[in-house]
Image (cartoon, coloured by chain):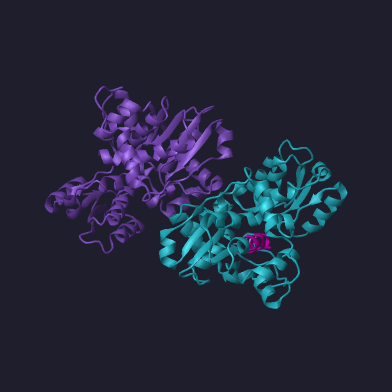
Chain colours: A cyan, B purple
């Protein structure tokens, strides 16, 4: 445990819950007899694939934007992301009538571009700015635009308000299940796992929080082993939400203090888990969203005899890719 | 309206609810902003794809078996079905410790055979009997086995206890939503729509119940027009749960009395609706389960300005076929 105070406390998560009440979905918690027979555990799946936008990211984005000052609301928000964070910011900005500029790769899937622009429709000062992901630096573009236009940049994970928002997912889960022995959470930049770890340790003292990364991109596992943030090359994995090169400063401080360890699973295990959810629970879960469940179902973490919470982080996967993965190529 | 008493009343459905309490899932009711913006209706999707067995069929099967006499429980149940009814009977029989014989086509998908046999494992006197669907008559086999072994045959829809069980789906839905203007229900043999029509008219007086069939197999639409049961050739449609040649005597009596009309949708509309559920609601809905929703989303029924309940009947579709349909071939 660190002795320095953590960047967020449970009070921040409790406040986020109030901001999100009636705005974010209280997503269902589901179980599967098949999964429980196979693992010998009680498994509680928190279905953030049913969240607005199809992913937990809405929680953090909305919690951040809802705390903007009147001046920030007037000038607007800027975000860069090829994934769920962009849409989460665009939707939250729309709901709060805040202008949004979203920096996205020019080769983003048409459906994602269309969805983001859909949220911005009719919103003053809102637009998608495209960049070339092979030759341009999105962070530099984001910073430049933020400066030029006086807009507030909201990063995808390394931000206390974002982390606190994500933690509401675990808080809702444990409210419903009661105390748990173990919580499995996927790890990309660490926003979800850090928020959830703070919520879980507060609401279920003695719980063990285990993060799950793709085998190909275990930067946080390495970081925990070294005690400092390790940066890796962009990993090649189906879990596009966990293709981060390194976690954040704020998220690492929480992970270091509250996450017991990091497990890893292979892409093959993710695909089997994705099929399991389609076949048995009739749910679409994106590859990144399968990380925690794969750790339990594929034996990467010992769950036998335990009461285990699992965050299914999202369900946003392009249908052609999803179809291909279900079909086994 | 018929003047003869109907084969089931709301009291039968209320009694079925008590038998099913704590055994069947109370499935969630979900909404979609996208679908509501597109149709101008309030749409309440009752998710029987999340029911045990992955389909509403469990409700009727369990309600029937739970009413067996001690002698019937000893000798056991027999059912013939290539689809969800077989598995619903096998699971219900297991839960009630009743022997079950299930007559299935010898070329049934391996997953379905395995699932059915899985439910029968360790159950005395239980087995799957295979037949050749091109040369043998499953009804004759079923009747012969029933007679030889003294077992009780439970048909997939034309049975008052089965119909009453299916009606609990609409009862739960309206309990949750309050009064509705319209209820859309898929129609195969008519077990679901007849049970739901009785429940809906009781709990939401003035409601209009509309059945939905595949374009290629509109036998009930023809039957309502003629005022008597019309038998058609086995229709070629993706909606395998609605490939019935004719509805039942008991189900037709209720449909004739309580169903306003039958709408039809094409296989192409079913596939678009299936994709919509995967993409937007992150749910697997089988083609038959999409009939009611397709009628609303594709304009086969005028829903604008109405509060509309839609029963999504199930989610049991073989993954390879599902993948192929999502991919658009």
Report the front residue among A116 and B20: B20
Residue B128 lies in the magenta stretch: no
Query: Which corner quadrant of the image does residue A191 belong to?
Result: bottom right
Residue found 23% across the figure and 55% down from its top: B98
- Residue A314, position as x, y percentages in the image: 58, 54
- Give the answer, above or below, for where A67 lies relative to A192: above
A198 within the magenta span: yes
Residue B200 visible somewhere in the drawing: yes
B185 lies left or right of A223: left
**With B253 as the anchor, is A316 left or right in this view?**
right
Highlighted magenta segment, given as a residue range = A186-199
Where is residue A85? Give x, y as percent.
68, 53
Give the farthest residue toward the bottom: A226
Q: Main secondary structure of the magenta part?
A: helix
Whether residue A285 is visible: no
User: Residue A21's spot in the image, x, y percent?
Assistant: 63, 45
Most foreground residue, A84 or A63: A63
Image location (x, y in percent) of residue B113: 31, 58
User: Height in image: B259 above or below B122?
Assistant: above
Q: Quadrant of the N terminus of chain B?
A: top left
Please identify the residue farthest to the right as the structure is shown.
A148
Total marks in image: 0
Q: Is residue B154 left or right of residue B195?
A: left
* Residue ID at (56%, 52%): A49
Q: Residue at x 67, y 40 (%)?
A: A118
């Amino acid at each position: 445990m660190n002795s320095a105070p953590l960047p967020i406390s449970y009070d921040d998560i409790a406040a986020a819950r109030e901001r999100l009440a009636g705005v974010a979905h209280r997503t269902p918690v589901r179980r599967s007899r098949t999964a429980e027979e196979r693992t010998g555990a009680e498994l509680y799946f928190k279905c953030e694939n049913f969240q607005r936008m199809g992913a937990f990211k809405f929680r953090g984005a909305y919690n951040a934007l809802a705390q903007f000052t009147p001046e920030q609301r007037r000038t607007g928000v800027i975000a860069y992301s090829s994934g769920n964070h962009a849409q989460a910011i665009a939707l939250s900005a729309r709901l709060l009538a805040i202008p949004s500029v979203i920096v996205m790769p020019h080769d983003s899937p048409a459906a994602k571009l269309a969805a983001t622009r859909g949220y911005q429709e009719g919103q003053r000062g809102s637009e998608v700015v495209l960049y070339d992901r092979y030759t341009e630096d999105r962070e530099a573009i984001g910073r430049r635009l933020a400066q030029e236009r006086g807009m507030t940049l909201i990063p995808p994970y390394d931000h206390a308000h974002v982390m606190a928002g994500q933690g509401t997912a675990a808080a809702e889960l444990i409210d419903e299940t009661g105390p748990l022995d173990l919580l499995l959470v996927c790890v990309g930049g660490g926003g979800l796992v850090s928020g959830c770890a703070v919520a879980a340790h507060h609401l279920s003292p003695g719980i063990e929080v285990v993060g799950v990364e793709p085998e190909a991109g275990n930067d946080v596992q390495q970081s925990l082993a070294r005690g400092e943030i390790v940066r890796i090359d962009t990993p090649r994995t189906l879990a596009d939400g966990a293709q981060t090169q390194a976690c954040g400063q704020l998220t690492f401080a929480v992970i270091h203090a509250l996450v017991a360890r990091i497990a890893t699973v292979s892409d093959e295990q993710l695909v089997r888990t994705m099929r399991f959810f389609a076949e048995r629970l009739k749910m679409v879960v994106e590859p990144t969203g399968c990380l925690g469940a794969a750790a339990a179902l594929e034996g990467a973490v010992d769950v036998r005899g335990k009461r285990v919470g699992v965050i299914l982080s999202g369900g946003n996967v392009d249908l052609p890719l999803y179809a291909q993965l279900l079909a086994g190529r």
